[in-house]
Image (cartoon, coloured by chain):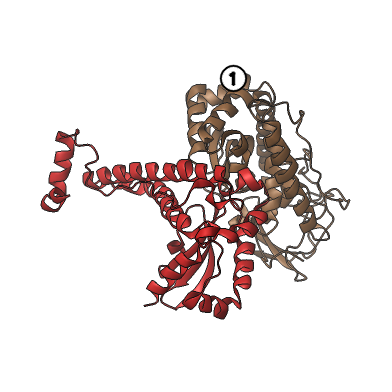
Amino acid sequence: MAIRSVLSTRTLSGLKETSSKLLGFRGIQTFTLPDLPYDYSALEPAISGEIMQIHHQKHHQTYVTNYNNALEQLDQAVNKGDASTVVKLHSAIKFNGGGHVNHSIFWKNLAPVNQGGGEPPKGALGGAIDTHFGSLEGLVKKMSAEGAALQGSGWVWLGLDKELKKLVVDTTANQDPLVTKGASLVPLVGIDVWEHAYYLQYKNVRPDYLKNVWKVINWKYASEVYESECK
Amino acid sequence: MMMTTTSSFLWSCSLLPSQGPNRQTQWKRHEKVLSFSLSCSPKSTVKFYMNGALVSRQLSRKVAVSGVVRAGFELKPPPYPLDALEPHMSRETLDYHWGKHHKTYVENLNKQILGTDLDGLSLEEVVLLSYNRGNMLPVFNNAAQAWNHEFFWESIQPGGGGKPSGDLLRLIERDFGSFDDFVERFKAAASSNFGSGWTWLAYKANRLDVANAVNPLPKEEDKKLVIVKTPNAVNPLVWDYSPLLTIDTWEHAYYLDFENRRVEYINTFMEKLVSWETVSTRLESAMARAVQREQEGTDTEDEENPDDEEPEVYLDDASEEVD
């Protein structure tokens, strides 16, 4: 918005108080739930339509809503110089912001079979996987094992360490984004191993979910990210 | 064997008696105390508090309290039929939550400890030892989750809910203002516990507000009820609290019945499931233990090694390094 670039933060907060009717006008960028580039049922039978719908419309939407709330509270606290509140909000921001970041990547990591889901990576990423893990099967085995062994809630990632120029497999707890494990880590593929990602279909058998999810992994997207980071 | 090579850990000598599946008082004054080695090396060092001083000892494996090598822990069924909590917690949930999740923790735990030094200990002892001051040993997850789930099934009952009475209500009102205030805070804690975990009502006696700290001058007001949130498998036993009530907020606990609606699950838990009778019984035990511990603490301060009686800690090598 043009107004934002002209006014200072102080004026903005003054405006906020005097014109509460300006809906959606905030000194901060807020977020919306991204659309899925495929139908909820398009990933079946690997992931059920029921799970996709609840996962997207309920879980991810809640992260977005709560993230926006936390950001707004943060903005107010920062403007007031309320350091205690700023610090107190960090866990809500990390959790909900992380949830939004991670799930936005996740939807792009998945694709229906008729849109290339499950097709092995070619090109630079395919080569890098063979170099670092011996083969795609080797990578899949490692990620599935680490995902199954993760206690509680979290994610298993294939990432690129852009400084060391190598691929890594790592896990994060709860909604911690991959970057919390290393500032130079770029997520290529993330697999959600929170129970909500598979429970309605696979119940307690997380390894079965991890066996099947590879059938809908969108390696094209991962390759794009890899190649753009490697330039 | 599976145990990692942590060679020393801190363990309060005034350990709570077992509250878990055994429910026997295993810690009595002048009884032989269990000692054991955690690593594969022939001797390991154990540090603990005795009479207020930090002491470290070289230990090797001694006789387990029961004297019997157990065949393994059992999966105890809930104290009600699996469909008895309907419609508040479905039969299907019990089938999976107890019949698969809880069962798997017990089975995997038994596999992990068979033939190791942990074999023969009570479940609570395994939990406390494997917690290892927060640097958990591999067996902790299964042991603590086995303990937690048994405690959870016993925390609820068909026709549960309502209000507590007697000492429990008195303490709740004393420490939280009112029962409604307590419920609000408990629910807020449970719904804000990010990720997987548990929320507890616990009785905290004579502890400072820092883990591993001993309160040197305990007073009546140091004994109080607290609400505690824990992640994944952790439970308040590891901080020497007495758990009274727990709610499982891992998604598997509510997903089949409530999907993502954790708040609704928590409300249902408080209104229809919680067994205040059980919580009251647990509180009575906890308060009695706290009193007993205080008496023991006062007595042992005056004695070093009583004549004709076993020392409080059974040692192999009496060499002592005081930190």
Residue A225 against residue A2 in the figure, above or below:
below
For the residue pair B240 and A85, the one nearer the viewer reads as: A85
Q: According to the rendering, which colour does chain B have?
A: brown
Q: Visible in this render: residue B235?
A: no
For the residue pair A222 and A145, the one nearer the viewer reads as: A222
Q: Residue at x 41, y 74 (%)?
A: A227
Q: Position of residue A125 (x, y in %)?
A: 49, 74
Q: Residues within 10 Å of mark 1 (few under 14, many from 20)?
A: some
Q: Is residue B279 left or right of residue B210?
A: right
Q: Is residue B239 left or right of residue B72?
A: left
For the residue pair B143 and B306, the one nearer the viewer reads as: B143
Element under disc 1: loop
Residue positioned most to the bottom: A131
Q: Residue at x 75, y 69 (%)?
A: B40
Q: Position of residue B99 (x, y in %)?
A: 75, 41
Residue type, numbered disc 1? Lys
Q: Residue at x 38, y 41 (%)?
A: A65
Give the quarter of the figure containing the C terminus of chain B.
bottom right
Q: Is residue B150 left or right of residue A147?
A: right
The answer to which image quadrant residue B153 occupies is top right
Q: According to the rendering, which colour does chain A have?
A: red
Question: Chain ID for label 1?
Answer: B
Q: Visible in this render: residue A57?
A: yes
Residue named by callout 1: B163
Q: Is residue A122 left or right of residue B10?
A: left
For the residue pair A203 and B40, the one nearer the viewer reads as: A203
Q: Position of residue B271 (x, y in %)?
A: 58, 23
Give the quarter of the figure containing the N terminus of chain B.
bottom right
Q: Position of residue A176 (x, y in %)?
A: 46, 56
